[in-house]
Image: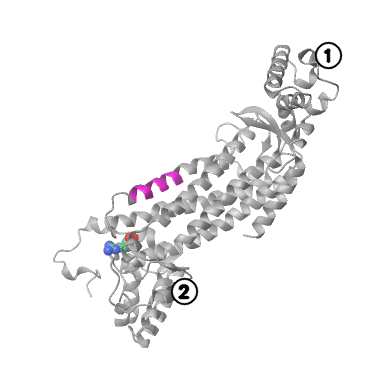
Amino acid sequence: MSEKPWSGAFTQPTDEFVEAFTASIDFDKRLALQDIAGSRAHARMLGRQGILSEADVEAILDGLEAVREEIEAGEFPYSVALEDIHMNIEARLTERIGDAGKRLHTGRSRNDQVATDFRLYVRDEIDAILAKLARFRAALVDTAEREADTVMPGFTHLQAAQPVTLGHHLLAYQEMAERDAGRLRDARRRVNLLPLGSGALAGTTFPIDREWVAQELGFDGVTENSLDSVSDRDFAVETASACSLVMAHLSRLAEELVMWASPQFGFATLPQSFCTGSSIMPQKINPDVPELVRGKTGRVNGDLMSLLTLLKGQPLAYNKDMQEDKEPLFDALDTVRGSLKVMADMVPGIAFHRDALRKAASAGFATATDLADYLVRKGLPFREAHEVVGKAVRHCIDHGLELPDMDLATLQGFSGVIGEDVYEVLTLEGSVSARDHIGGTAPDQVRAAVERARRRMEGE
Ligand code: ARG
């Protein structure tokens, strides 16, 4: 046999640089175990259908097992000349078992083979990321429960807006992560369909049984159209897109943690095991982990763009362009896995400084809306109440006061309907506990939301 499994029609050897340029073995060796699983199922199906003899099937299965052991032991002789993982494994199999190895590719093409391997790989990765997401979500929920009563400033435009509870703030991220999990599960439904049997593009002349292979490999069904099957990478785009959103959410949390850990905010201290120092400034304890997570978001977005751009403009069906699908998605999956792990590990160890959070919530007139709502309850139309409170705030700014610092007479100067009971609504606890409905920031609502989130996670 000549070195290349496809060289029959060639009269010139491959250019040396082209050999390396066109090879994918350096990165698609990751698909080795999926390739062997796919080949096992394919070989057994060929045997069941009477396309291969039982003896050949037996030899192929034993040979593939030996190759698998070689790979797991780190002893497989990967060859760039053999281009990709598919031809590497097939050639090694044939080296070991002879002619039976050459029959394995009956009724199959690398085009449906690679699509199958890639889908198997992505399916497993989605499951692994879902497990990591679940850990991250549990960390958020547990911390939210612990901090259900902790009052902090809620921001819009990064300006103090209204007091919220830290538990409520953290649960916002659990909601994002829950949607991320839903998107990944949804993508998985379209990932988990078997393209094998589509051949190079048109199907195969052999009496194959695709349903059987699908079942063997744990697919939910088979893909419908052979042309589409070998050229569809929507599943990769969808998965990368879900990864991008995971990173967007992690990055927003990371950004807040970086700010909160700065002495200027002083809201939180990150565990030192997740920080690093400076080579010149001895005082520095830097929040590198959230910064890196924020930074890595860019590369995952880039991965998504690579995949989208890869697909655009490719005529049906398979084109070699497709080989470029792997590195971006591998990178996105690796990055998301690592980022989720490190954030899930870090969150439970963050020390939140309740006094500083409280102090910050007390500044910046965060209970101004509560005062306006109070006036509405006393009969003022909301727009008038807004105006009255605006004037009161202006008075405070001019005199260096916060709203509760004004005495009753001063407050009554802004509106005669104000009574002694106004001070209750100006407290932080009064403000948060008054928002006592589903979705609101009241501590009791946070505790109820924690319970609901836990129950939903158990049901997933
Ligand atoms: N290494 C290729 C890929 O990753 C496998 C399929 C190649 N098929 C072909 N006819 N060149 O897409």
Above or below residue 60? Residue 396 is above
Q: What residue appears at the point 30 percent right and 59 percent down from the top-left corner?
A: 23
Q: Is residue 125 left or right of residue 153?
A: left
Closer to the N terminus: mark 1 or mark 2? 2
Q: CA distance from mark 1 to mark 2?
A: 79 Å
**Residue range highlighted in magenta:** 299-310
Label 1 belongs to which residue?
Answer: 409
Element marked by disc 1: helix
Q: Label 2: few (<14), some or many (≥20) within 10 Å?
A: some
Quarter where residue 204 is shown: bottom left
Q: Amino acid at mark 2?
A: Gln
Q: Is residue 433 left or right of residue 306?
A: right
Q: Amino acid at mark 1?
A: Ala
Graded by Cα atoms within 10 Å as few (under 14), some (14 to 19) or many (20 or more), the crowding at tag 1 reads: few
On the question of residue 89 being in view, the answer is: yes
Q: Is mark 1 within 8 Å of ligand 1?
A: no
Q: Which mark is residue 72?
A: none
